[in-house]
Amino acid sequence: MRRLLYELSESFRIAWTQIRANKMRSSLTALGVIIGIIAVTLMGTAILGIDAGVEKSLAGFGDDVLYVTKWPWRDASNDWWNYRNRPPIKPAHADRINEWIESHPGGPLKLAVPAADWNSATIVRGEYRVTNIHINGYGAAFPRIMRADMKEGRFFTEIEANNARNVLILGVDIANALFPNESPEGKTVQMRSQQFTVIGVAARQGSFLGLFSLDSMAIMPINTFRRYFPINSADPSIRVQVDVTRLEESKEELRGLMRRIRQLGPEKKDDFEINSQQVVREQLEPIKKGIAIAGLFITSLALFVGAIGIMNITYVSVKERTKEIGTRKALGARRRTILLQFLIEAVSICLVGGVGGLMSAWGLAAIVGQISETFPLVFSPLLVGVGLFLSVMTGVLSGFIPALQASKLDPVEALRYE
């Protein structure tokens, strides 16, 4: 065992001496490994970034919320006309669901809140104007089922919601655009030729999957929303808080309840959809798989090219040091010692390439993260481990055959080699 440890340490010393003596050749040889490690690392950071972005975007919507909508969140192109002809979801359905919840306190359903949105409103305040704003209408119980942190001010009350008061809660970006140097709380803005009082500013939430900003939205009571916007064209929905430990039971309970509210007979299909966050996650799986397949192909190609380069340079090294091998074997060096020497040299070059690839990938991920904050790239310790493992395996696979050939050289023939 002591002899093996000595041979290993000596092989590493010789390997690093050769790498330092041939810096340019070693760097060019490691280039293929560097490119391969960059590819596999960036692929991993992209996949982890998608996961992190999805979780961040969905965090404010609650894992314990089901969405009753007209349209499914999955691809509806194959049956578009049938979905198009479905009757719209009515905000009054939320009252019927809440009545059922009150009469069944031990059931899996907890609370229902109506919702609707309009995506092309304009808000004006004096000389300031903000266009293409998403206006969301919610019931007063919205903060109880969703994250609704406030930067300043408050959410609207049950009385304000029932009486359809003209009150607004602004997103941070809208508030900053309309009130650049002052607090908007208690101030008045104009929308659809009507005056609205700003009662609060929502805390910064970022974007949803990088598609649109949640900070460029405004919220009002849904009864107020119905007064100024065509509710049936505003994609109304109902958000239902459920017992997350009984999710499947909750879906079936809600489906049966909606069928009774819609008065659907046993032979009729559902004319509504019950969606959940899991649908969004499932929609992103093909994207993640596509990135993984493309990254695997690029990585395999780059590492294959790198492995050929390392195998070639190891063969060259064996030829250049044939007399040295003969001398060492004549002095009693074992085949194992010679094999370890050249194998560790190949692995060392790959490790240098692996470390260089990881550092380059980390730098690129940091640059992309600064440029595009909406798409986080997650550089995890697992990726570092995978990168180093692939580097070592590339060195072992590409350097083994030349190292084996070196270990089998006849000392007499090797000493006579010119």
Image (tube, grey):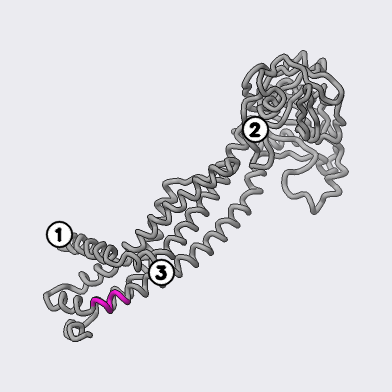
Residue nearest the viewer, comparing 229 with 125: 125
Disc on the earlier residue, 1 or 2: 1
* Disc 3: CA contacts within 10 A as few (<14), some (14-19) or many (>=20): many
Residue nearest the viewer, comparing 238 with 102: 238
Disc on the earlier residue, 3 or 1: 1
**Marks 1 and 2, how far apart at CA:** 61 Å
- Highlighted range, magenta: 316-321
Q: Quadrant of residue 330?
A: bottom left
Q: Which residue is mark 1?
A: 2
Q: Is residue 258 visible?
A: no
Callouts 1 and 2 close, C-beta under 8 Å = no
The residue under the point 77% across, 17% down is 188
Outermost front residue: 127
Q: Quadrant of the N terminus?
A: bottom left
User: Which label lies toward us, 3 or 1?
Assistant: 3
**Marks 3 and 1, how far apart at CA:** 32 Å
Amino acid at dot 2:
Phe
Q: Which residue is mark 3?
A: 307
Amino acid at dot 1:
Arg
Residue 226 left/right relative to 332: right
Q: Which residue is mark 2?
A: 61
Residue nearest the viewer, comparing 282 with 177: 177
Q: Quadrant of the C terminus?
A: bottom left
